[in-house]
Image (spheres, rainbow, N blue to C red):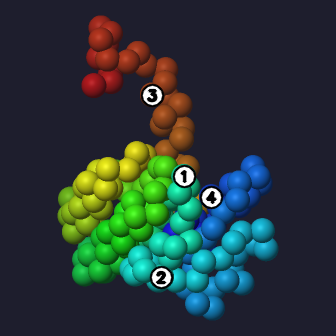
């Protein structure tokens, strides 16, 4: 797993370990203490597959969660140098090692102002498809968590929306 100490990675790592999975987590030098004791640290660089390919075992599920924190239009260069570069490295490593499945958390289609982010993620998805690995590409619209709870304010509106019939009805509330 890449990104195991990050915003998405740490909760996923904890759930996987709770369910009894053996998890090897790619971490930077000096970050091994951020992992729980029952996770196996793999010290390496997410942008350099040579630093971790040997630790991937044939048949592993490779989960890739590396990405720029707090994406914004001002981080266009980082989307290419980190998000895209890390997925290129990860697909290469997973394919070379014989991983059984590749899981990539991409992004839904946010506001058009985020075109550089979308472009890097779309290119990452293309790399996953080109790898030939069986893959799951997830495209969350938004991820709830610490500091990111404002979408909970929308829940009452979703509740009201459920009261109306879906498309195909006479009312035609849903498209």
* Camera-side mark, 4 or 1: 1
C-alpha distance separating marks 2 and 4? 23 Å
The first of marks 4 and 3 along the sequence is 4
Which residue does the numbered mark 1 point to in the structure image?
59
The first of marks 4 and 1 along the sequence is 4
The secondary structure type at the circle numbered 3 is: helix
What is the x, y in percent for residue 123? 23, 61
C-alpha distance separating marks 4 and 3? 31 Å
Which residue does the numbered mark 4 point to in the structure image?
12
What is the x, y in percent for residue 99? 48, 56
Residue at horizontal 48 percent and vertical 37 percent from the top? 157
C-alpha distance separating marks 3 and 1? 43 Å
What is the x, y in percent for residue 127? 28, 59
* Camera-side mark, 2 or 4: 2
Residue toward you, 39 or 67: 39
Which residue does the numbered mark 2 point to in the structure image?
51
Residue at horizontal 63 percent and vertical 67 percent from the top? 24
Quarter assignment of residue 82: bottom left
What is the x, y in percent for residue 22? 70, 59
Q: Which mark is residue 161?
A: 3
Mark 3 Cα within 10 Å, few/some/many (few <14, many 20+)?
few
């Amino acid at each position: 797993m890449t990104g195991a100490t990050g915003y998405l990675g740490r909760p996923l790592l904890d759930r996987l370990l709770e369910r009894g999975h053996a998890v090897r987590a790619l971490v930077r030098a000096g970050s091994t203490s951020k992992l729980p004791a029952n996770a196996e640290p793999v010290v390496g660089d997410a942008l350099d597959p040579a630093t971790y390919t040997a630790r991937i075992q044939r048949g592993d599920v490779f989960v890739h969660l590396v990405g720029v924190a707090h994406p914004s239009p001002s981080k266009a260069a980082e989307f290419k140098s980190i998000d895209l570069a890390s997925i290129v490295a990860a697909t290469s490593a997973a394919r070379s090692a014989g991983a059984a499945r590749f899981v990539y958390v991409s992004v839904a289609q946010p506001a058009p102002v985020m075109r550089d982010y979308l472009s890097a993620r779309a290119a990452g998805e293309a790399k996953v498809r080109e790898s030939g690995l069986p893959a799951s590409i997830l495209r969350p619209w938004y991820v709830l968590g610490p500091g990111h709870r404002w979408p909970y304010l929308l829940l009452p509106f979703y509740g009201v929306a459920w009261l109306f019939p879906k498309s195909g009805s006479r009312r035609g509330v849903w498209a």
